């Protein structure tokens, strides 16, 4: 099984999901998305696989989201996507993509759906 994780090593939830993947006997491709942000096409592909909208993976607790006005319900998907591409810290983590789908693994147990 192919597994990829959009990972932030400073995030405890991300570290726990990575450990859980490895504990299940898999070695995922680790993408430190703050160092290597996804392209627009990659992010759109992830959203399609998740059956999600950009707002669904917006890190709302990140102060920059408020500063940029992204919590306003009138902001468009395109505006949110553009902001996430310009500032990857706005992408909630961890996102795991496997042969069985893609999930934002918050809570960690969401990982079980795609392992």
Image (cartoon, rainbow, N blue to C red):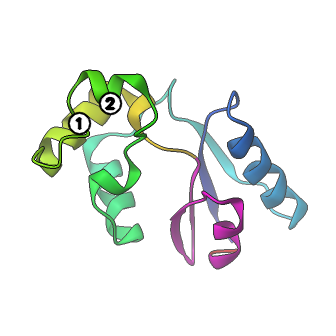
Residue 70 place in picture, x, y as percent = 23, 36
At horizontal 35% and vertical 23% (from top left) the residue drawn is 64
Judge from the rendering whether residue 72 lies leftward or rightward of residue 95; answer left or right: left
Q: Nearer the viewer, residue 97 or 63?
A: 63
Q: What range is drawn magenta here? A: 94-113
- Was residue 96 drawn as part of the magenta stretch in this picture? yes
Q: Give residue 108's quadrant in the image.
A: bottom right
At horizontal 90% and vertical 61% (from top left) the residue drawn is 23
At horizontal 12% and vertical 43% (from top left) the residue drawn is 75
Q: Which residue is mark 1?
A: 70
Circle 1: is it few (<14), some (14-19), or many (20+) Cα within 10 Å?
A: many
Q: Are marks 1 and 2 in contact (CB under 8 Å)?
A: yes
Q: Which residue is mark 2?
A: 65
Circle 2: is it few (<14), some (14-19), or many (20+) Cα within 10 Å?
A: many
Number of disc labels: 2
Marks 1 and 2, Cα distance to the nearest angstrom?
5 Å
Q: Nearer the viewer, residue 38 or 105?
A: 105
Judge from the rendering whether residue 26 lies leftward or rightward of residue 48; answer left or right: right
């Amino acid at each position: 099984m192919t597994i990829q994780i959009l990972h932030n090593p400073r995030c405890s939830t991300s570290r726990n999901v990575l450990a859980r993947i490895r504990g299940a006997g898999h070695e995922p491709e680790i993408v430190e998305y703050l160092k290597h942000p996804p392209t627009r096409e990659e992010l759109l592909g992830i959203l399609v696989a998740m059956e999600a909208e950009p707002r669904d993976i917006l890190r709302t607790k990140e102060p920059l989201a408020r500063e940029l006005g992204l919590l306003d319900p009138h902001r468009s998907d395109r505006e949110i996507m553009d902001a996430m591409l310009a500032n990857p810290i706005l992408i909630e983590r961890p996102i795991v993509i496997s042969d069985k789908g893609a999930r934002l693994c918050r809570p960690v147990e969401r990982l079980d759906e795609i392992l």
